[in-house]
Image (spheres, grey):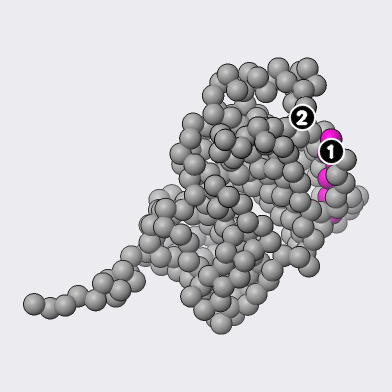
């Protein structure tokens, strides 16, 4: 009999690429132009994530109108700014300035009414907004808000020369471990931004069973085990088990977003995300009666 080294066998089991898709141009708020990377019908396949938007323009007309006061209930929004300045104000009296390299992590839960308005009249505004679901048991908890300045977000460089911004969760490539700026229960999200110079690779460890997504926002990427490269403005949905190795010949900037699926019903009506239609109708009633945040 020949002994088979299980560790060696396991090493070649890479996460499978389930789909690659391009974002769709859209507008939101008071007419801000953006790219909806995913969101809308079929969002269950991205559970626990609900939506990812990319915004980026050097034309003030594309962003100047901003996002006037609007409600949310039942989930979390994570805004990661690459360039530009955006002011947040909400019904709880929070005022925050989101600037290049910073993150705003807002847990809407029972309800929040907030605005996000540009704090600039010219220049580039660029970043991402991610919607992360909450489990039914915490959807009606109190709202909360974190304004995380760039200097409070861990950054590191791997032995292979990849710069990593560790926004949430725990980064681990087998050589370096680093906790992110935010840790969340239930969905256990990981949110990393990789800046990969040409000819580099990275092998981030993701817990088995976590749903993992990649978004290439600059350059091009190869995913080990998948024959085709992934070009800019494409999102990759990966299987929930196996290892992950990313390589780039040309250089790439990539978001890695992973989380533990909630596997609960998702009923969405605009800025409200609950488990049942009745809960959505209650949210609408509460909003009309000025009780969304009560």
Q: Residue at x 80, y 37 (%)?
A: 114
Secondary structure beneath disc 1? Answer: loop
Q: Residue at x 29, y 75 (%)?
A: 8
252 horizontally vs 290: left or right: left
**Residue 160 rendering spot, x and y as whole percentages:** 55, 81
Q: Residue at x 57, y 53 (%)?
A: 189
Marks 1/2: CA distance? 9 Å
Task: Please tell me whether residue 88 belongs to the stretch shown in magenta.
Answer: yes
Q: Which residues are magenta?
A: 85-92
Relative to 264, say whether 241 is above or below: below
Badge 2 is on which residue? 293
67 horizontally vs 154: left or right: right
In primary-sequence order, the first of circles 1 and 2 is 1
Q: Are marks 1 and 2 in contact (CB under 8 Å)?
A: yes
- Picture quadrant of residue 141: top right
Crowding at dot 1, Cα within 10 Å, few <14 / some 14-19 / many 20+, comes out as: few
Relative to 217, say whether 59 is above or below: above
Secondary structure beneath disc 2? Answer: loop
């Amino acid at each position: 009999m020949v002994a088979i080294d299980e560790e060696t066998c396991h090493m070649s089991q890479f996460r499978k690429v389930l789909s690659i898709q391009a974002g769709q141009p859209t507008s939101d708020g008071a007419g801000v132009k953006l790219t909806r990377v995913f969101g809308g019908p079929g969002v269950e396949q991205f559970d626990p994530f609900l939506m990812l938007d990319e915004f980026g323009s050097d034309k003030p007309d594309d962003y100047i109108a901003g996002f006037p006061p609007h409600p949310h209930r039942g989930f979390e929004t994570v805004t990661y700014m690459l360039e530009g300045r955006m002011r947040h104000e909400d019904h709880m009296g929070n005022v925050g300035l989101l600037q290049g390299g910073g993150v705003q992590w807002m847990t809407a839960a029972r309800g929040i009414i907030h605005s996000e308005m540009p704090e600039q009249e010219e220049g580039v505004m660029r970043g991402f907004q991610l919607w992360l679901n909450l489990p039914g048991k915490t959807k009606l908890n109190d709202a909360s808000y974190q304004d995380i300045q760039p200097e409070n977000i861990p950054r590191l460089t791997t032995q292979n020369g990849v710069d990593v911004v560790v926004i949430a969760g725990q980064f681990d490539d087998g050589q370096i471990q680093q906790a992110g700026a935010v840790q969340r229960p239930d969905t256990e999200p990981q949110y990393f931004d990789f800046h990969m110079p040409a000819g580099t690779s990275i092998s981030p460890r993701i817990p088995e069973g976590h749903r993992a997504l990649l978004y290439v926002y600059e350059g091009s990427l190869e995913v080990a085990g998948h024959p085709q490269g992934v070009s800019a403005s494409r999102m990759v949905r990966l299987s929930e088990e196996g290892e992950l190795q990313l390589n780039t010949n040309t250089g790439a900037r990539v978001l890695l977003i992973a989380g533990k699926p909630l596997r609960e019903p998702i009923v969405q009506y605009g800025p409200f995300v609950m488990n049942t239609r009745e809960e959505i109708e209650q949210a609408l009633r509460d909003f009309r009666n000025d009780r969304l945040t009560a």
